[in-house]
Every structure is written in C-alpha cells, then in structure tokens.
Amino acid sequence: MRGSQTELLDTFLKLGFLSPEALKALKARGAGKGIPVMEAAIVSGILHADAKGWVLANTLGIPFLEVDPDAVPLSFSEILPETVARENLAVPVSREEGRLTLAVVDPFRNDAFSRIEEMTGLGVTLVVCPVRTITRILERFYPDPLSLSPGEAMAGAIGPDEAREWIARGRGRRLAENVLLHAAKAGIGTVRIYPSGRSVAVSGDSGRGKSLLLSFPLRFRGALVDAFAELAGLPAGRAPVEESIVQLETATGIRAFRISILRGLSGEEAVVKVLPDLKSVIALDSIGFHPDQTEVTRRLLSSADGLCLVSSPGEGGVATTIFAMLREAHLPGRRVVTVEETHRFRNDGYIQLERREVENRFGGTWGRLAETLEPDALAIERVAGREELLDLVHIARRGIPVFCGMQGIDLRRTLLTLFSLEVDPFLLARVVRLVMHQRLVDLLCSDCRRAVPAVPPLRLAGERHRERLETLVREVSFHVPGGCPRCQGAGYSGKMALFDLLPFTPGVQNTLLSGASLEERMERILGENLLSAFPSAEDLLRRGMVTFDDVLPFFQ
C-alpha cells in the first residue's frame, strides 16, 4: 500500500472519515484479532465510503482524485448513456488522444468498464473518486428533481448516504425501488409516503407497529410521489386514485407491489402494499397461457434464437409477457439488452434502457444499437412501425434472439404486417419463432360480482366458435360487476392477459413459402395452426371471473 497506514489514518481523521473514538476501537480490534488496523477498519464496515475508495486506490495503484464537479464539461454527459453512468457510478472526467478518464467508486467492475470501451471505442483509464463527487457530477449531467444536498435526507431505518447513492444510481425511481425491496425484506406490509410537519415521511407498517424508513424536506414531496408513480407506470393525471401492480426482480426472486397514488385536498400521497402471494407472478405459466400454449412456447424458446412478436391493442401487459419469455429462455451469463417505454421491471443482470435514451443515442435505429452494444439477446417493448420491425428481423437473422411488442388490433392484422415486409419470405420462415396477440381482460371482484339470468346474444360470435358457445350458454351462469369497498366501487379487481398464439411450425413455414395468394395462406395458417384463447376465456366464464362482453373479441 502506497503511504503508511499511519499516514492514511491521520488523513481520515483530518477529513472526518474516522472519529478518534472509532480509531481507538479499531486498534483494539486489530490487536485482539492479530490483523493490521487498516484491515480491521475495512472488515468492520465503519469506514466512510470515500475512505474505502482511498484504501482501494492505494492498494491497486489507481490514482485517488478529487475533482471539481463544476469543472467537468457538460458535453461529457453525451459520452455514456445515463443508465450506464448511474448504474456503475462512473463518469467521464477527461478525454484525450483516444482515451477516456473515468472516475469511479468501485474499480472492480471490470465487465462494465470493458463494455464502456466497446460502446465508446475509447480506451479507459480509471481514477477513484469520492461518492459525493461522482453524485454531484451525475446531478449536473442529468438533473433530477429529487437531487439532495448533503445533510438534506434525514435518517430513518434507511440511512441518508444509502438514499443518496440510490438516487445517484437511478434517480428517484431507483430510490423507490430500493425502498420497496427494503420493506419486503424487513417484513413490512405497507409503505406510505405522506407529509409530516415540515418533512415528507416514508413510513412502514409491519402489522406489529409503524417505523420511519426515510424522510426528506417537504419541498421534495411531489418529486418523491412522482418517483413511485413512475415506477408503477402511472400517468401524470388528476384522478383521485390511480393504482398499478409492479414487480421487481432480485437475485432471490420476484416481489410484487400494488402502488396507489392518492390525490386529495391536502395534496398527493402514495400508499404501497407488499403482495407476498405474487412473488413469482411473471413466470411463463402465470401470465395467462393455457397449458397447450405454455408447452409450445417453452419448446420454441428452448432454441434460444429467432424472433418472437407480441401484439396488443393497447400498451399494457406487453412488457410482462416479454420479460416472462426472457426468463423462460434462461440466458445466464449472456448480455441481455432491454428497451422499455419506461422501466417497469428491474433485473440487475440486464442492460436496461428506456426508449427515449435509444432515440437520443442511436436515433431509434435498432441496428445501430445492436452494433454498439452487441447484445446476446434483445427485448423491445414497442416497435413503432414496419421499418423498425424489419430492422429486428435482420438482427434475429444473425442468431440473436429478439423479443418485441407492437400495437395491433388482432392476430390477423399483425400477421399481415409481418408478411408484407419487404423481405424474402424464406427469411421470415427461417427467423420467426412465435407470433401472439394478447388482450387484457378485467377480472370481476369476487366479493361483489353478481350472477344474472340473462343470456348474452351470440350474433357477434364467429361461426367456428358458435357451437361451443351455444353449449357454454346452456351450462353456465354469467356475471356482471357489482361494487364494494374492497374494489372501491369499481366492480373489478385486477387484470389478466388472454392470448391467440401462432407457433411457426414446419407446417406454417411450408404454407408461407407456397405459391398461394397472401389471403389464402393466411386462412390456411390460422385455420390449421392457431392456438386460440378460447379455452382460457371459456374457463374464466365458467368460473364467473369475467363478463361475456370482455372476452367476446376472442370469439369473433
């Protein structure tokens, strides 16, 4: 280690990284265990994070640099995507002659630094920098309404230094994620964000008692509530109550939370319920497939290549389906790049980008993104048009598994869009693995649903389903929404996706390459190979979980 331990400890005392009482205790601990006092300091966990960085720098021969955050050019913010800089607490501080000087907190993130070299085409030189300095540079590069000055976050069960680091790594959204994961781990059932005097409090209720997790100055109230709303994917609206379920993936599994944003006369608040019964909610067999669809999808995903396309009439639910397929494909150790409209699911093993970042950095071109990031798998929540879809077909042609979503009215129109691309049909037959159309249906509240004697009309049902529907009408009772305190008068409680699914089997491939007209090929492909949502819709109707009108589109 460059510089004696005595010199380093004296420096830490002068900078306030270590108190005289703590130093005395460390010397006693080191003597008792027969280890150097500096090793005792690191193992004990009482050293300030900046002091640990200093020790690492000295040990590895990497410069420990104090940088003036205001002296770093703002143009350097364009060198790295914001998510990469925040996730790794790494910021460019100098660039010259094909080399980039990167200020970091943790110099052991070798994979991340190699990826940065690939992304930028520049050699990377590391310097270790204090956390507070890198946090300040990130605040200048990417301004955030929840940025805190030192001492402004007031401690609860979660320390202020930890809170500031979460914000630095991923803005207010990352703070919200980690607060909820902390709550779930601690056995807390409810988290509430609300004003308390001159502060905004983040409190937890375990059922046995309440505790303060974190608090901020009151002026951060709006930004803090907005962070939870963003995590839930809720729009900035004025509805009195808005809520959504969000899942967070960790090394130990998936945790689910119901986030409610309340707007009243006293302003905005957020209430979050931890849902312990939904820990594995994003598994492939729990998103709405019936057993035959699950079996076929698993078999196709096991090839770990090709293109899987999910269409939906709206935006909701597509990301859930794509992430379920990613997990089923099981790509450990491979570079998975995901692009979402806004982040809904966090997975520490993925490179996760938002659509706006891709548009700013790569011009919204998937080919440029693939060339720069070199993914082993690519997931896109929403494809904006035919040109983007064609771009992804060519990426899948290179052996990269691609999972993507697009807006569409039904499966037939989605297939027409795919088959009308200006590309050799042989390429489509070879590359596409699976096309599905999903539609979210509202689930009736089990406490207040009402059975009705009326029989729904079948005039809008398609001919191929009519006979089975007539049998269903004779055998089951149909239900309509009621309204109760549990569902807040809505009559519904939750949503579920139903799927029409078309696997690209050898039969589909042969029909696609035949000389028949496009319309004839479509009729044969759908008539002989479609795995319809009918069994799932029928099951929900028999159990009284949906109204007939909500599942009617699958019978047409």
Image (cartoon, rainbow, N blue to C red):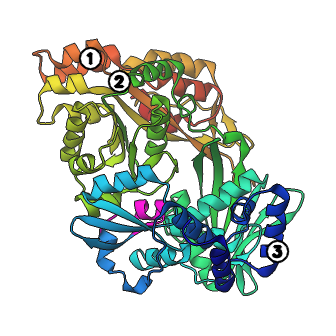
Q: Is residue 358 above or below residue 329?
A: below
The amino acid type found where label 1 is placed reads Val
Give coordinates of residue 111: x percent, y percent: 42, 49
Spatial CA span between label 1 and label 2: 9 Å
SS class, disc 1: helix
Q: Residue at x 45, y 33 (%)?
A: 331
Q: Which mark is residue 502?
A: 2
Q: Amino acid at mark 3?
A: Lys
Q: Is residue 106 above or below residue 494?
A: below
Mark 1 surroundings within 10 Å by alpha-carbon count, few (fewer than 14), some (14 through 19), many (20 or more): many
Categorize mark 2 by other alpha carbons within 10 Å: few (<14), some (14-19), many (20+).
Answer: many
Q: Report the span colored magenta.
A: 79-91
Q: Between residues 172 and 313, which one lies in front from this camera angle?
A: 172
Magenta span has 347?
no
Q: Residue at x 44, y 51 (%)?
A: 110
In the rendered image, which quarter contains the C terminus? top left
Residue 31, position as x, y percentages in the image: 82, 62
Is 477 placed above or below 345 here? above
User: x, y percentage for residue 257?
Assistant: 65, 52
Give the alpha-carbon distance from disc 3 to disc 1, as whole Å.
Answer: 76 Å
Task: Identify the mark nearer the N-term, 2 or 3.
Answer: 3
Q: Is residue 294 left or right of residue 7?
A: left
Secondary structure found at label 2: strand
Contact? badges 3 and 1 (CB < 8 Å): no
Residues marked 2 and 3 touching at CB (< 8 Å): no
Question: Residue beneath label 3, please?
Answer: 24
Residue beneath the point at 43% across and 27% down:
555
Question: Residue at 60% across / 40% down in the picture?
Answer: 443
According to the picture, the residue beneath numbered tag 1 turns out to be: 508
